[in-house]
Image (tube, grey):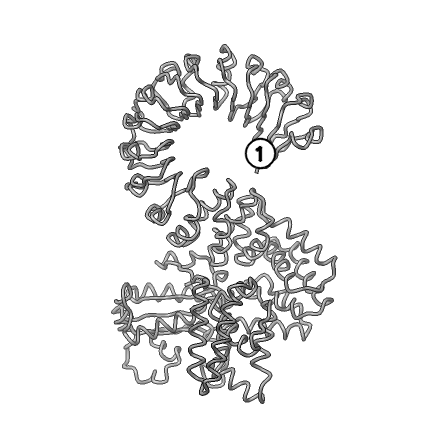
Amino acid sequence: MRGPAGSGKSTLVQWLALNAARQSFGDELTGWNRCVPFVLRLRAFTALDSLPSPADFLRAAGVPLHGSAPAGWADRLMHQGRALVLVDGVDEVPDRLRKRTERWLKDLIVAYPRAKYVVTTRPSAVPETWLSASGFEPHTLLAMRQEDVRAFIGHWHRAARSECRAEEERAELDRYENALRRAVGTRRDLGLLATNPLMCALLCALNRDRRMQLPRARKELYDAALDMLLVRGTPDQVFTHLLNRSGLLREPAPGSVGFVHRTFQDYLGAKAAVEARDFGVLVRHAHEDQWDDVVQMAVGHARPDERAVLLRGLLKPADREPEHGHRLVLLAAGSLAHAPELDPGVREEVEELTGGLLPPESPGSIDELAKVGDLAVELLASMVEELTEREAAAVRTAAEVGSETAYELAKQFREDDRGLVADAVSSAWKGFDTDLYAREVLAARTWEDNHLAVTTDAQLSALRHLPLLRNVHVSGNRPDLTAVTERPDVEQVFVYRNDHLSDVAPLAAMARLREIGLSLCPQVRDIEPLVRPGVEWLSLAELHPALDPSPLARMRDLRYLALCHPFLMESVGELPVCEQVTGLELLWQTRYMNLEGLEGWTGLRELTLHGATHFRQLSRMRPLHGLSELRLLSIPELDLRLLSPFTALRELLLLPDSLASGLEPLTELPFLETLVLYGEGPYDLAPLTATENLTIQLAHNTHATGTHLFPPDRIIRLP
């Protein structure tokens, strides 16, 4: 079970132990009613030379009667599968001891495979796959939603009213409860704070203590909470209250006191470090995920000059330690929110370095940010309003992190209709709970202009949560596609890498089908069922070697055809002539088929060619009547002089391996209006300055010189 501090991991462990002891589990966990729970809090063992064996579980769990258990009792329970081992707090184990903890857990599982195990941790402590090889399945504790917060507020005040003796006090608590409900529902800052049970409890207590005057920032909240807890009574009274009533301290053994949650431990540890001016210890440990909150709180506690020292101390090793550089810079950036007063030069330096990391530009930078975890996600979340379409990489980063904070970030983009953002929202599905993401994120759009990518059986099943789905891309060996084919709303479907699919009739029978693509489906050899009204777009790629293309001639509504299949024929002229087709793609698997007979496709307006052979053949043909759009892909030493006969071209897209000539030959195409350039380049645009009606579109990361010679509206940077 993964979740941030205060999210309820330890409480969940207690709930599991209590229900096992009471034998009160229902539904899917009924089998756990025969289990004896053993609660093992890992922080209790960090000072010991070894972790407990089953014989020591009762002693380790602090059970007073541990000496009364029969010899071998725990061992027998483990062997019989009647033990529920609840291991709490991997994140509270120091980095140097986590390998020991991992070995201990794996040894237990090997020795006692029938026992049941639950392990809790903060997400940043260990990767999600940490114990996957041992059969563990990761689950994330969700942040409290508004209805959860409202329910918690009601439960808290109900419990508080039960302790009131006077009716006046109970009436006062009614007012506090109503005021807090309104405040949490209308104040964004409180909504951000009230995301877990610990914070909700603090808000309830502070709202009561401060008579509905609540603080606005996290550090202020901690300040106020500790002020509420510490300023009353003698030190002994305060300590007794903290230990017995606050839920913040616990005494696992006589004379040994610790924090129930690390939140206040971090807060007070940061305060102590600042008061001792021990910034060195903060900087030395800043690369460890356990110290993120400590460092940020220390920046909040420090005076302006101390903040500058601490933040510069974080940035200095960021240059020397590339393996920790991203984390240290982002930690400094996250700390700025706690530094209202700061040397402007230091703030500028932090912001400049952060700008080089956020938002991420490439898959490699996404991977690096994902290693930083929620710290990176929180900073990205603060930038949501500024992100461009290309910077939808923020959503991909969230998917790689996979935490609840990351989920909330991805969720903010659910209605964003920009193309790359929609693609990122779709691909992020794999990083989160399948059904929840479908219900709360994917269901918010119709998936019309962009496709929804389905890559697992669980995702295929979860399509039932989407009220409207127009465009879907299903990949992988999915033997049952009824979750798609039985929907009445799907208009566009693409099936990719499916070894099971042989009969396309169920796909062809879809009522609203307009576009269909079949790629790397080697059992498909008959496309006859696709001869039906309404199919306007078709893509066939690497299907059965004996695929018969003859049904193409009878697809009367077909307008666009993409082919990447090694048909057993010598020329395009042997393909069925589709007079009504206006767009044709001939991709790399058609390279052995020459273009003779292409002039028979009289309706052709758009043509895409892949490779040098087809381009050379096209250049030797008479210009195709009506051809206005041409796309040339993966052509080495592309010689644009060969395009001179094609004077009717209006749009040209180039993705060459290399250019034999510059772009100057394009000046001989009098009607050319749009030039789209992909690839690294660099392209020299200077020869095209005299073409007044030409607009040039440059793909992301495509380099070009001479852009300054054009009016700004004629150079478009694609996202």
Residue 390 falls in image quadrant: top right
Q: Quadrant of the N terminus?
A: bottom left
Task: Residue at the far top: name it.
Answer: 622
Density class for disc 1 (Cα within 10 Å; few <14, some 14-19, many ≥20) is some
Q: Position of residue 117 (x, y in %)?
A: 35, 66
In the rendered view, tell whether residue 135 sits above or below residue 90: above
Which residue is at 41% across, 22% downward? 590
Judged left or right of residue 203, residue 589 is: left
Q: How many marks?
A: 1
> Front-most of 679 and 162?
162
Residue 155 falls in image quadrant: bottom left
Q: Position of residue 63 (x, y in %)?
A: 37, 81
Q: Position of residue 689 (x, y in %)?
A: 69, 23
Q: Which residue is mark 1?
A: 699
Q: Position of residue 401 (x, y in %)?
A: 49, 54
| Circle 1: residue type | Ala
In the rendered view, tell whether residue 84 sits above or below residue 412: below
Residue 310 falls in image quadrant: bottom right
In the rendered view, tell whether residue 315 sits above or below residue 264: above
| Element on which disc 1 rests | loop
> Front-most of 327 and 202?
202
Judged left or right of residue 262, residue 696 is: right
> Front-most of 663 and 282?
663
Q: Quadrant of the C terminus?
A: top right
